[in-house]
Amino acid sequence: MHPMLHDIRLVAFDLDGTLIDSVPDLAAAVDAMLGDHGLAPVGEAKVRDWVGNGSRKLVERALAFALERVPDASALDAAHERFLAHYHAAPCERTRVFPGVREALEALHAQGLILTLITNKPKAFIDPILEALSLRTFFAMTLGGDSLPEKKPHPAPLLHLAAHFDVDPARCLMVGDSRHDVEAGKRAGFRTLAVPYGYNHGEPVSRSDPDALVESLRELV
C-alpha cells in the first residue's frame, strides 16, 4: 500500500474530478439551462473550471458569465431548478470513471478499509451515478452537498463520517482533486491526498499543500 495509508482505517473520497469525469454531463445540463433562458452555451472547458462548490454555485457562475453580471436570487433559483431538471434527465450518459479508480477501490475494499464518499453534488444524484458506473457497492456511506447543514470545505461532513464509524480523524484520509477537499481534510484532522487531473478552478492542486499527491489512484495499492 501507499505510505499515506499506513494506520488508516477510513478513506473519504471526493467524487467529481477524483473518481469520475462528470463534466460532459454537467456541461450539457448547464448549456441546456442557458438555452432555456435564451443564452448562449458555454461548453465543457468553462464548466470544468466552475465545478466543485455544488450545483447552485455552478449555475451561478454560468449565469454570471452568460449575463455578464451577478444574477439576482430569483433568477438563480429558476435557473438552478432548470439545471437540476436537465441533469436529472441524463446524469450519467457521458460520465466516465478515471483510469486506476476501479482497481484502487477494489483493492482497498478487499483490505477491509472503510470507504466513504463526500461530494458537494446534491445527494439525489449520487446513487444513480454510482449504480450506473458499478461503484456503489464499494462505499459504506455517501454524503452529498445537501446531506448536512455544511459542505466542503467545511470539515463537518468529514467529522460526521469519522464519528459515525467511530474512527479517530488522525486515522482517516481525505482523497480529492481540489483545494476544497484539501482544506476540509486539514480542518478535520484527516490526512490529505490529492490527484492533479481533476477540477480545481484552473490552478494546480499542489498549491493547496496536500500531504501527498498521486498521478493515479492506482498508486494507492
Image (cartoon, rainbow, N blue to C red):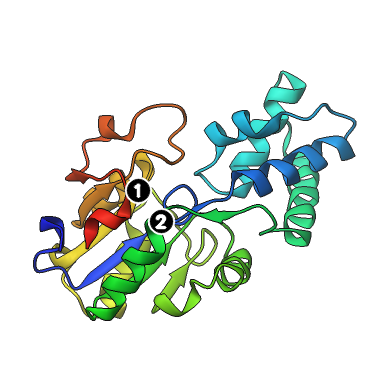
Instruction: Tell me what residue is drawn at x 65 percent, y 44 percent.
Output: 24
Mark 1 or mark 2, which is nearer the start of the sequence? 2
**Image-quadrant location for residue 131:** bottom right
| In this view, 61 is above or below 26 | above
Instruction: Tell me what residue is drawn at x 26 percent, y 33 percent.
Output: 206
| In this view, 100 is above or below 211 | below
Q: Camera-side residue: 27 or 215?
A: 215
Q: Secondary structure at mark 2?
A: loop
Instruction: Tell me what residue is drawn at x 51 percent, y 67 percent.
Output: 147
Label 2 with label 1: CB-CB less than 8 Å: yes
Query: Horizontal and vertical percent for residue 174?
Result: 28, 57
Residue 190 seen from this side:
yes
| In this view, 102 is above or below 65 | below
Tag on residue 181? 1
Query: Horizontal and vertical percent for residue 23?
Result: 60, 44
Q: Camera-side residue: 112 or 148?
A: 112
Q: Residue furthest top?
A: 68
Tag 1: amino acid: Asp
Looking at the image, residue 12 sits to the left or right of residue 151; the answer is left
Q: Camera-side residue: 76 or 201?
A: 201
Q: CA distance from mark 2 to mark 1?
A: 7 Å
Instruction: Tell me what residue is drawn at x 70 percent, y 31 percent.
Output: 43
Query: Horizontal and vertical percent for residue 78?
Result: 80, 46
Tag 2: amino acid: Asp
Q: Disc 2 designates what residue?
A: 14
Sort mark 2 into few (<14), some (14-19) or many (20+) by Cα contacts within 10 Å: many
